[in-house]
Image (cartoon, rainbow, N blue to C red):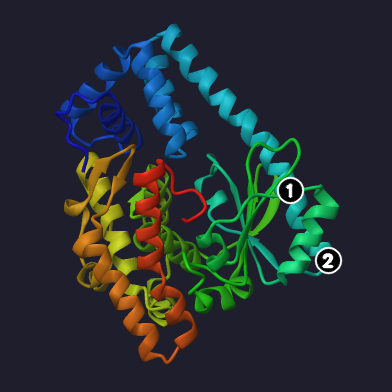
Amino acid sequence: MPNESTQHPSQKSMVLLSRLLFPPNDEAKSAELIAEVRGISQENFDDLVNLANLNHVVVRGLEAFLKIVRDANDDVRAGWATAAIETERARINVAIPVLHEVCKAFDEQGLGVAVIKSLDHWPDLGSDLDLYTSAKPEQVLELMRTRFQAQTAARSWGDRLARKWNFEIPGLPEAVEIHVGRLGQTGEQTTIASHLLERTRSIEVGGVPFRTASISDRLMISTLQRMYRHFYFRLCDIVDSGELIESGAIDYQDLRSSASAAEIWEGTATYLVIVSDYVKHYRGTGLNLPAFVSETARFGGDQAYYARSFLRVPIMPQSAGLYGSQLTGLLRQGDLNNSARLGLLPWLATAAYVGQKITGSDKGIW
């Protein structure tokens, strides 16, 4: 967890943002939070907004900030927060209609499609727009080029393995990232992908309908992204998944069954426990997880640490153990194709690390 005694501005912003998103139950700590918000400088507020952007919690974080300064009749800081929220909402108001048009175009062609990840953060939005489709790659490329005059961005080795494309649509700052028939860093997750579209649910965002992943699939996709690929959490992951837990929307039996079939149940349980532990660290009380989830987790939030703007989970030995379990499980299933794909992950990660050290960028690899 972030060390609250640190003097590093970015880390202090992480702590403040976490307190805003998970306000403490303790009266004294609540008073400390209010005093810190009321005394924040313009420079530190700008750092807070930057961190909120990186963690996809601008609207939710700053709305909590705005309530505190409005209660104090602080028009100056209220103006800062209002301007930042309006800027973010203006971006979102451009992106949502385009995302809807892309989904509509797939539907009109009879091509199965669902939004994944991006709408999980509502009323915030991710930095790109993610879709999953069961269509053939050539159908996707043709549709995006002819209907939206989209250009394909350069693809990394990881993109090719994962079978995903990033499209740049004129007038849209965000890339549209489309996963085609596979999920996971190396495209190893055909188990989740093969059932994703038949399990989708309908939601309404900004007055517009979308098909998006089921609750279980949504959590498994988040787990793949955080525990098996990036090895860090954004604050939006904690907020999004925490709200699902508290709402009672999770069918834990379905989640365990689905995640076990995909050989990522231990990673999924660990993901949920880290979410609960993070909330407990700031709010004072954790989340109500079934015992079988907590007992399955390999480690908890006490192993997570703050670095480079995000909450990170240790790769060695914790995450490496989860990777090993996933690979062993796929081999046990006799899934040689996807096992071979997953077996490339350490080499890909090593190449990305070396590239980062030599050139300062892992572009083209990861």
In this rendering, is residue 298 above or below 245?
A: below
| Image coords of residue 113 (percent x, y) | 69, 64
Q: Tell me the element at label 2.
A: loop
- Residue at left 48%, top 74%? 188
- Image quarter for residue 300? bottom left
The CA distance from mark 2 to mark 1 is: 20 Å
Q: Is residue 58 left or right of residue 10?
A: right
Q: Is residue 59 visible to us here?
A: yes
Where does the image place residue 288, in percent across and percent down from the top left?
28, 59
Q: Amino acid at mark 1?
A: Gln
Earlier sequence position, callout 2 versus callout 1: 2
Residue 358 on image: x %, y %: 37, 45
Q: Quadrant of residue 327?
A: bottom left
Describe residue 35's horizontal placement relative to residue 237 as left or right. Answer: left
For residue 59, above or below residue 39? below
Q: Is residue 350 left or right of residue 363?
A: left
Question: Which quarter of the rendered picture does the N terminus lie within?
Answer: top left
Q: Which residue is mark 1?
A: 151
> Residue at 29% across / 77% down in the picture?
325
In this view, 67 is above or below 22: above
Q: Nearer the viewer, residue 320 or 238?
A: 320
Instruction: Residue 244: name its quadrant.
Output: bottom left
Who is closer to the viewer here, 359 or 189?
359
Taking the spot 24% from the left edge, 35% from the top edge, the residue there is 24
The residue labelled by disc 2 is: 109
> Can residue 242 be seen at all in this image of the molecule?
no
Give, as a three-letter code, the residue at label 2. Answer: Gln
